[in-house]
Image: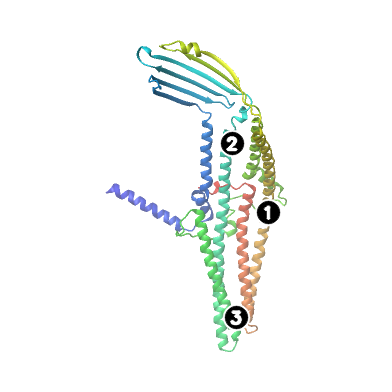
C-alpha cells in the first residue's frame, strides 16, 4: 500500500502545483520564460535546426570511411558454380580524391576443375581541374552554413517571441486598465443619472439633463463591455503564444508598484533615457555588428561568391588521374593467370569534354547575378536595420515625455470634472459640462494608459533593433 500511495500522492501534489502556477498571477518575465520553453511559435525554427544537422551529417558522411562487404554464390549460365567474398574500404578526401582498398577471394567450379584466387586492389582517383578543392567540399560547406543559418533563424525567432509576448502581455494589462477606467466612468455616469432624475423631480433640472445623463450611462456601459471583450481577446492571444490551452485560466500581474512602464525593461538593465545618445550613430554601429539578420546577409554574399567560384571551376574540362595497384594470387591460389594479367601498378589519365558548354556557361552567369543580388540584399538589410534603430531610439525618447504630458492631461481633466460637478450641484450650469468633462477625463486616462504601454515596449524594441536582446535573461 505504501508503494502505491506515495507515488499517487506525489502525482496529486505535482498536479496541484501546476494548477496553482497556472492560476497565480503571471508576471512578464515569467510569461516570457514560459513562452521560450513551450511556445508553438518556436517549433518550426527548432525543426529547421534539426533538419540542418541531419543534412550536415549526410554531407559529412560522403567524406567518411565506408565499409562495403560483398558476398555472392551461385552459378553462371553454363552451370559452373562460383563464389565471391570481399570487403571494400573507401574514403573521399577534401581535395576530391577517392581512395579505395578492396580485398576479395574468388572460386570457380568444383573438384579438379576448381579455380581459386585471392588478392587485393588499391586505387586512387584524383581530379585535377573540375571537382578539385572548393568544388569537392561545396556540399559539405553549404550544409555547415545551413546549421549556422538555422541557428540564427531560431535565435531571431526567440528574440521576436520575447517582443511578441511583451506586446501581448501589456495588451492584456492595457485592456484591463481601460476596463477599470470604463467601470469607474460608468459608476460616475450612473450617479449623474440618479442625481439628474432627483433634481428633475424637484424642478432643478430639465428633462434634457436626464436624457443626457441616460445617454452618458449607456455609452459608458457600451465602453465597459467593449473593453471587457478586449481583455479576453488579449488573454487568448497570450495563451496561444505561451502554448497553453484556450480553456485554461490566465491572470496577469498588474501591480501599480512598480508602475507598468518599469515592468518590461526590468530584465534589461542598463537602458535609461539618459543612456540613449542624441545621435543614434553609435546604436546603428552596434546593430550592424550584433544583429543576426545583418550577419546572415553578409554570409550569404560569401555563399554566393563561393557558388560562383564552383561554377567557374565547372567550366574547366574534367581531367582525372587514376592510379591502381593490384596484387592477385595470394594464399593457395590454383592459377597464376590472374597474377600475370593484373599484378602491379597502373597509372592513367582520363577526360571527357563536351563541345556544347551552354549549361555550364549559363550556371556561371547565373552565379554572377546571384552575387550581385546578395550584395544588394545585404546593403538593403543594413539600411533597414539602421532605420529600425533610429525609429526605436526616437520612440524611446518620445515615450518618456509622452507619459508626463498625459499625466498632466489627466490631472487637468479631473479638475475640470470636479469644477463641472460643483457648478452643476449649485445650479449654476446644467449637466452638459459634466458630461463633456466625463468624456475628456476618460480620453485622458486612456491616453495615459497607452503612453505607459508604449513606454513599456520601447526599451524592449530598442534592444531588439540593436541586436542586443538576450532571451536567456528571462530563462530560469
Residue located beneath label 2 in the image: 142
Disc 3 crowd, CA 10 A, few/some/many (<14, 14-19, 20+): some
For image coordinates 60% across by 60% down, the residue present is 453
Camera-nearest label, 3 or 2: 2
Left-right relation of 118 to 419: left
Q: Nearer the viewer, mark 2 or mark 1?
A: 2
- Give the spatial CA distance, label 2 vs label 1: 35 Å
Q: CA distance from mark 3 to mark 2?
A: 72 Å
**Residue of label 1:** 391
- State which tag comes first along the sequence, 3 or 2: 2
Spatial CA distance of label 1 from label 3 is: 44 Å
Front residue of 94 and 99: 99
Q: Earlier in the sequence, mark 1 or mark 3?
A: 3
Residue 356 coordinates in the image, percent (x, y): 66, 31
Residue 205: image location, x then y, percent:
60, 86
- Which element is circle 3 on? helix
Q: How many marks?
A: 3
Q: Nearer the viewer, residue 309 or 105?
A: 105
Residue 424, given in percent of the width and then of the height, sits at: 62, 81
Q: Is residue 217 visible?
A: yes
- Horizontal side of 367 relative to 194 (left or right) equals right
Q: Name which quarter of the figure residue 128 lies in.
A: top right
Could you tell me if residue 259 is visible in this image?
A: no
Q: Which residue is mark 3?
A: 212
User: Where residue 244 is drawn, which disc sits there?
Assistant: none
Amino acid at each position: 500500500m505504501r508503494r502505491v500511495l506515495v507515488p499517487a500522492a506525489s502525482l496529486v501534489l505535482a498536479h496541484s502545483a501546476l494548477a496553482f502556477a497556472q492560476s497565480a498571477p503571471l508576471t512578464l518575465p515569467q510569461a516570457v520564460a514560459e513562452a521560450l520553453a513551450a511556445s508553438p511559435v518556436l517549433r518550426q525554427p527548432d525543426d529547421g535546426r534539426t533538419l540542418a544537422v541531419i543534412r550536415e551529417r549526410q554531407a559529412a558522411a560522403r567524406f567518411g570511411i565506408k565499409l562495403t562487404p560483398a558476398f555472392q554464390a551461385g552459378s553462371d549460365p553454363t552451370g559452373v558454380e562460383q563464389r565471391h567474398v570481399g570487403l571494400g574500404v573507401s574514403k573521399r578526401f577534401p581535395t576530391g580524391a577517392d581512395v579505395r582498398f578492396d580485398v576479395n577471394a574468388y572460386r570457380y567450379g568444383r573438384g579438379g576443375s576448381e579455380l581459386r584466387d585471392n588478392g587485393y586492389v588499391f586505387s586512387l582517383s584524383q581530379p585535377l581541374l573540375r571537382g578539385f578543392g572548393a568544388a569537392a567540399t561545396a556540399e559539405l560547406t553549404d550544409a555547415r552554413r545551413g546549421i549556422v543559418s538555422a541557428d540564427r533563424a531560431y535565435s531571431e525567432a526567440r528574440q521576436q517571441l520575447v517582443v511578441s509576448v511583451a506586446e501581448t502581455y501589456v495588451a492584456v494589462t492595457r485592456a484591463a486598465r481601460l476596463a477599470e477606467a470604463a467601470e469607474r466612468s460608468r459608476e460616475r455616469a450612473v450617479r449623474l443619472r440618479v442625481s439628474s432624475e432627483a433634481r428633475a423631480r424637484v424642478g432643478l433640472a430639465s428633462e434634457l439633463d436626464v436624457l443626457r445623463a441616460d445617454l452618458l450611462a449607456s455609452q459608458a456601459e457600451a465602453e465597459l463591455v467593449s473593453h471587457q471583450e478586449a481583455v479576453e481577446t488579449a488573454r487568448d492571444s497570450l495563451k496561444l503564444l505561451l502554448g497553453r490551452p484556450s480553456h485554461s485560466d490566465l491572470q496577469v500581474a498588474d501591480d501599480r508598484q512598480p508602475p507598468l512602464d518599469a515592468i518590461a525593461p526590468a530584465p534589461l538593465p542598463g537602458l535609461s533615457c539618459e543612456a540613449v545618445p542624441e545621435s543614434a550613430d553609435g546604436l546603428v554601429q552596434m546593430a550592424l555588428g550584433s544583429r543576426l539578420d545583418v550577419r546572415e546577409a553578409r554570409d550569404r554574399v560569401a555563399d554566393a561568391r563561393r557558388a560562383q567560384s564552383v561554377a567557374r571551376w565547372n567550366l574547366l574540362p574534367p581531367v582525372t588521374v587514376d592510379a591502381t595497384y593490384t596484387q592477385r594470387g595470394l594464399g593457395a591460389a590454383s592459377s597464376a593467370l590472374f597474377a600475370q594479367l593484373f599484378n602491379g601498378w597502373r597509372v592513367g589519365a582520363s577526360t571527357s569534354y563536351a563541345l556544347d558548354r551552354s549549361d555550364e556557361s549559363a550556371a556561371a552567369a547565373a552565379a554572377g547575378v546571384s552575387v550581385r543580388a546578395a550584395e544588394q540584399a545585404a546593403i538593403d538589410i543594413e539600411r533597414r536595420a539602421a532605420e529600425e534603430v533610429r525609429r526605436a531610439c526616437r520612440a524611446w525618447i518620445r515615450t518618456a515625455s509622452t507619459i508626463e504630458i498625459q499625466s498632466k492631461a489627466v490631472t487637468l481633466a479631473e479638475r475640470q470634472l470636479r469644477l463641472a460637478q460643483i457648478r452643476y450641484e449649485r445650479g449654476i450650469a446644467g449637466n452638459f459640462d459634466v458630461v463633456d468633462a466625463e468624456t475628456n477625463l476618460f480620453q485622458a486616462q486612456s491616453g495615459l494608459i497607452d503612453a505607459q504601454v508604449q513606454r513599456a515596449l520601447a526599451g524592449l524594441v530598442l534592444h531588439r533593433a540593436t541586436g542586443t536582446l538576450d532571451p536567456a535573461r528571462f530563462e530560469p
